[in-house]
Image (tube, helix red, strand yellow):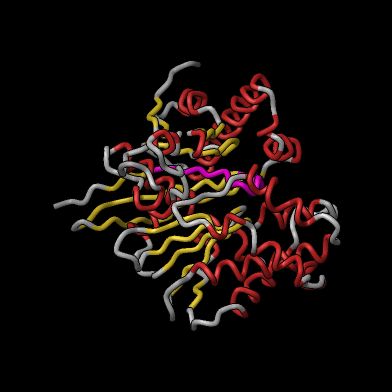
Amino acid sequence: MKIKKFNIIGVMSGTSCDGLDIAYCSYWENNGSWNYKLKNKSFAAYNSIMRDKLLKSSKLSSYNLKKLDNELGELISESILNFIKQNSIKPSLICSHGHTVLHNPKEKITLQIGNPLIISAKTKMKVISNFRELDVLSGGQGAPLVPYGDKKLFSEYDYCINIGGIVNISNLKSKKLIAYDVCPANIILNKYSRAMGLEYDEDGIIASKGNKSNSLFTRLNEISYYSQYGPKSLDINLIENKFIPILKGYSNEDILCTTTHHIAYQINKSIISKKSHVLLTGGGVFNKFLLKKIRSYNKQDHNFFVPNSDIISFKEAIIFGYLGLLRYLKYKNIAKSVTGSRYSSSSGIIVESKLF
């Protein structure tokens, strides 16, 4: 029997606000197991104007936020159309996560922008978007969502850890899928790199020249978020209110150094099983100083595995393509054990518009 393959584009805009990850994959199911092949990929960097708008998006008026929603929708559409043309591909579906602006599960609020109506109309394709809201309305955290894809596509590992704007972890060893946001990462590191006129601290060179402040390290680790049990998730407002004020009064170099130690420590603390096989992905993996510290805080003989650069950079886009496919097929794509929702769900809105 011939196995049916689905050719899909996944698009991710992360909390680092650096740009769009675009992945074109084939997905197929065989004997109850899902597989994928990354066929093409691209990174579309935001210009400084768009990046600054996204960084300030949670503070915008409703009018300006809607304008930005449309602007980002136009930009995503243009990036996808260029990607399709350059690679001569014929996707059957686009799965766009959008960019998270607001996320407060306690108030049942989550908002991702990048208008899917515009994306669908411009590309003349079906678009799956708004992956988080159903889960939040059902009492869940709406995050992290990637773990469901980790379980299905990367099951050979004990843990999957993504180091992006925020670090999140998937525990694939537990009987029930467990996952949560661990700590801030590139959101803070990039913020203080930009204060020094840099987009980011390449290889962690500046951080490596700073001094670790033991008192700051202790204060960061005492933040109340770390004493909470999962399911739990982080958002930019919590980071701005709980983390950033603690960093005042320190030099940028020492902030970068101490925060790097903090991230490495929290990552290791989140791995509860000894001698675990751990997959590391996300932009933070390119930070050599951070990787060095992750390994130096490893006291339980974990094997940290760094894959090829395609998986490091595009794993989330690959997984959102998969989650969108599951939604299209009416299969569940969010586990209640991860988010704390009342039930597991098939989340996401299917859009097909012909506006233009």
* Residue 84 vs residue 323, the one in the foreground: 323
First to last magenta residue range: 8-19
User: Which is nearer the eye, 124 or 116?
Assistant: 116
The residue furthest left is 1
Q: Position of residue 236 (x, y in %)?
A: 64, 44
* Image coords of residue 182 (percent x, y): 54, 59
The residue that appears at 51% across and 57% down in the rendered structure is 168
Q: Quadrant of residue 286?
A: bottom right
* Residue 256 vs residue 199, the one in the foreground: 256
For image coordinates 41% across by 42% down, the residue present is 140
Task: Spot the residue most to the top.
Answer: 355
Residue 157, can we see it?
Answer: yes
- Left or right: 326 as drawn, with respect to 55: left
Q: Is residue 79 visible?
A: no
Report the side of 201 relative to 231 (left or right). right
Q: Is residue 279 above or below residue 62?
A: below
Specify whether residue 252 is painted magenta. Answer: no
